[in-house]
Image (tube, rainbow, N blue to C red):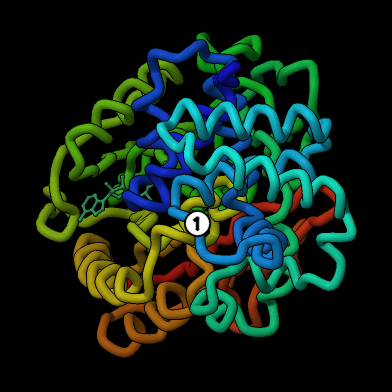
Amino acid sequence: MLDATRDAAFTLLDAVLDHRRPLDEALDGLSGMEPRDRAAGHRLAAAVLRRLGTLDAVLEPFLKKAPPDPVRHILRIGTAGLLLLDTPAHAAVATAVALARARGLAPFAGLVNAVLRRVAEAGSAALEGLDGPRLDTPAWLWTAWGRDARDIALAHQHEAPLDLTMRNGAEPPPTGERLPSGTWRCPSGIRVADLPGFADGAFWVQDAAASLPATLLATTPGERVADLCAAPGGKTAQLAATGAHIIAIERDPARIVRLTENLARLRYPVETIAADACLWRPAAPLDAVLLDAPCSATGTIRRHPDVAYLKRPRDVVNLVAQQDRLLDAACAMLRPGGRLVYAVCSLQPEEGPARVAAALGRLPLRLDPITLPFLSEAVTADGCLRTTPALWPERGGMDGFFAARLIRD
Ligand code: SAM
């Protein structure tokens, strides 16, 4: 019988790997499914994407020639079940064969059956001698991450926890722990909308590292502050919680809707403007600007393993140009002495330190080194923030972020 979880995982892998569609977007296309099956399919597809190179290397010796892509996806799902997820062998094989038949791949059902039986026989020995971190990381990312690559790739093997930023004074959920950064960390696999307090705006979802850039801006009540790339609004909410007057700029109409809904749930008063931040200018110079710039998002791969396969080096080239334009605009909005925090959820040096160095060379800005006593290992020699998924390993890691604080001359 066709298994809904594996069928959903197949749809998601096909969308990401064969049609270059983001996993979350493909997941939206499964909204007609039973929510539990859909969530399980999502987790299974993410597990396959996290270990894609390893799974392919395991399959390689058992394949005489390359199978069509859809057959390979079924083999990957079956192998992930057998070697990574403790699925009983008969269930992993039978569901894979049923999936092949249901997907019009009946001529390959025998191959799927034979290959997966052999993987089951080999068991964990099939993983021995494989360099998982290297196999599971596209070459251009491995090179760009330099000597941190192995630790980052190892951290990517694990599902990320669920991190919440609590509204001031709100009661945290019954499960989880408070991190030194203030983030409330719950185990992975929890549905956020099921947590008590969600509907009342007691918290919002935000990785521990993602909460740091807004903190570094250190806004105070009454200050006039722009959040230039605001949706879905995690950092906007943090800034609003300080009592500053926040102008949230976002240019994507669909994301503005999400931003507005999130801020309404959290009950934070924010002035929201639909505009291109490169073109928008404030009525009077601002005290502070947060620029959480569009980026390759390679720092979020443990939450979004599809990013490793969707992003290409040329995307970084295009993003770098946008980041420079946004930095120019941000600088022009500030009063003398005003503060700018530039942040990206990227691990690529071109999007981080290189952008700041270039901005310091062409704009009336100087670097304001940060201190972060509870995470000093994330502060670079020149006083910028560089987190990676390999930090706080005993607590479950964090996303990769770069941030720098700059002052307008
Ligand atoms: N700051 C957000 C948060 O913490 O929830 C995440 C921001 S996300 C990294 C970048 C956002 O910038 C996207 O929503 C994107 O649509 C928006 N964006 C990209 N280019 C922009 C531009 N030129 N002007 C305004 N918004 C832009």
Examine the image and state in which quarter residue 91 appears.
top right
Q: Quadrant of the C terminus?
A: bottom left
Residue 321 visible in this rendered orientation of the protein: yes
Examine the image and state in which quarter residue 371 appears.
bottom right
Up-down relation of residue 298 to residue 46 (above or below):
below
Q: Position of residue 287 (x, y in %)?
A: 33, 54
Left or right placement of residue 348 versus residue 228 in this view: right
**Observer-nearest of 79 and 67:** 67
Q: Which residue is mark 1?
A: 67
**Observer-nearest of 339 and 165:** 165
Q: Position of residue 74 (x, y in %)?
A: 56, 42
Secondary structure state at the residue bearing disc 1: loop
**Observer-nearest of 208 and 408:** 208
| Amino acid type, mark 1 | Pro
Q: Position of residue 186 (x, y in %)?
A: 74, 30
Left or right placement of residue 133 versus residue 344 in this view: right
Up-down relation of residue 95 to residue 36 (above or below):
below
Q: Residue furthest bottom?
A: 361
Residue 182 visible in this rendered orientation of the protein: no
